[in-house]
Image (cartoon, rainbow, N blue to C red):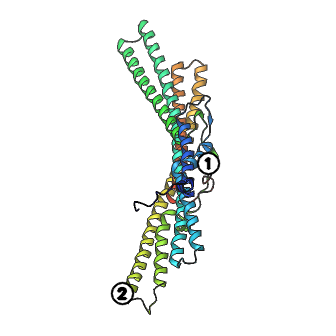
Amino acid sequence: MTPNEPTPVRTAASCAPGPALLRRLGAVLALAVVAVAAVTPVAHARTLDLETALAQAERTSAVVTARLDAEDAERDATRTDLDPLALRMDRLQAEQTAVRTRAAADRARFEAYRDVANAYVQALQASAQRELAEAGLALAERGVAIARLRFERGGATELEVRDAENERAEAANGAAAARQGEALALRSLRSLIGLDAGELEPVPDRLLATTVPAEEELVERLDASGPLLQALHGVEAARVGLELLDPSYAPAAQIERTELQLEQAREGAREARRGLELQLRSLIDRIDAARDGVAQSRETLEAARDREAIERRRLDAGLIAEVQFDQTVLNTLQAELGAMQARHDLLAALFELQAQTGIAIEGIDAF
């Protein structure tokens, strides 16, 4: 700028952010609202179910960002396709980018579903563990009272009283740790989804009954999944690059290099596919093992409940002490916790398959 040149005037229009920036600013503001909700006390906590929690995954920062990236790439591909000066490779690369970003957006959403589901079941399990620990503490306190009463009446030694008190102290520490664990798990869930809850509903059977497609079908769908798209697009780009070389003008060495690049891209895609197929097999095996675990834990729980019913009749008949029956009830609670954990392991395995492969599993792919 020369000394006599007037200083440019910054108008409102020249200072206005572009459309893409406005969209991202809007997304940031939306995420800020979620963040504020996560730290603002809720006056009336409500009962929360898993599907409502999963629906909040759409509002997490990673999902919002990936969705905006996909929309931008889609617009870029449209502009490139309509550009009369765009070359074939330009159009191909723009379309491939749009496809990959759409797949990345889906995978970000699937990963968010997995993270929310894991946080939800961890909170559920923490609450159940707290209840179990408090029941154990109540039983230990009764044990101390009984030991002291027997000691006063000459039926127990001072050592037995100390043993009972030590067991109560351990139970109290366990209960305190369980309460802290529950509070931490609930805070983690709330910070993730921006919702508070006074009580969490159990995992619905409908989600656990999700049918996983056959392995052969999943293998066929790997081509459209995010992890393999990059390699397949590299093959396509190399193939088109080779087609664009005119043997009449292109040097032979350049053609040979491009042919080598194509073969290397194909080999890379084959390696990527083999790795994904192995990973897929492992994820399916995990689901099968989790289903077996659910069946076994259900049998264990049924046996514990049958045992409790028997002990209840013995208690009513005066054949056992109440404290002995309370121990049986505690064993049933432990079996219930084991059954809950087995169900949650199955749920986690289902969401992990979807998140790791990027393949939508009907029933858990949208909320």
Which quadrant, please, contains the N terminus? bottom left
Q: Which kind of residue does numbered mark 2 sit on?
A: Ala
Residue ranking furthest to the right = 206
Q: Secondary structure at mark 1?
A: helix
In the displayed structure, 36 sits above or below 239; it is above
The answer to which of 44 and 3 lies nearer the viewer is 3
Residue that appears at 47% across and 34% down: 184
Mark 1, residue position: 207
Tag shown at residue 71:
none
Give the CA separation, mark 1 to mark 2.
57 Å
- Comparing marks 1 and 2, which lies closer to the viewer? 2
Q: Which kind of residue does numbered mark 1 sit on?
A: Leu
Q: Position of residue 187 (x, y in %)?
A: 50, 35
Q: Is residue 203 shown left or right of residue 281?
A: right
Residue that appears at 46% across and 73% down: 234
Q: Is residue 294 shown left or right of residue 159?
A: right
Residue that appears at 40% across and 78% down: 261
The answer to which of 304 and 177 lies nearer the viewer is 177
- Does residue 325 appear in this view? yes
Q: Is residue 47 shown left or right of residue 268?
A: right
Q: Sequence order check: which comes first, mark 1 or mark 2? A: 1
Q: Position of residue 266 (x, y in %)?
A: 44, 76
> How many numbered discs, if any?
2
In the displayed structure, 172 sits above or below 356; it is above
Q: Secondary structure at mark 2?
A: helix
Q: Position of residue 34 (x, y in %)?
A: 56, 41
Tag shown at residue 253:
2
Residue ranking furthest to the bottom = 248
- Does residue 346 appear in this view? no
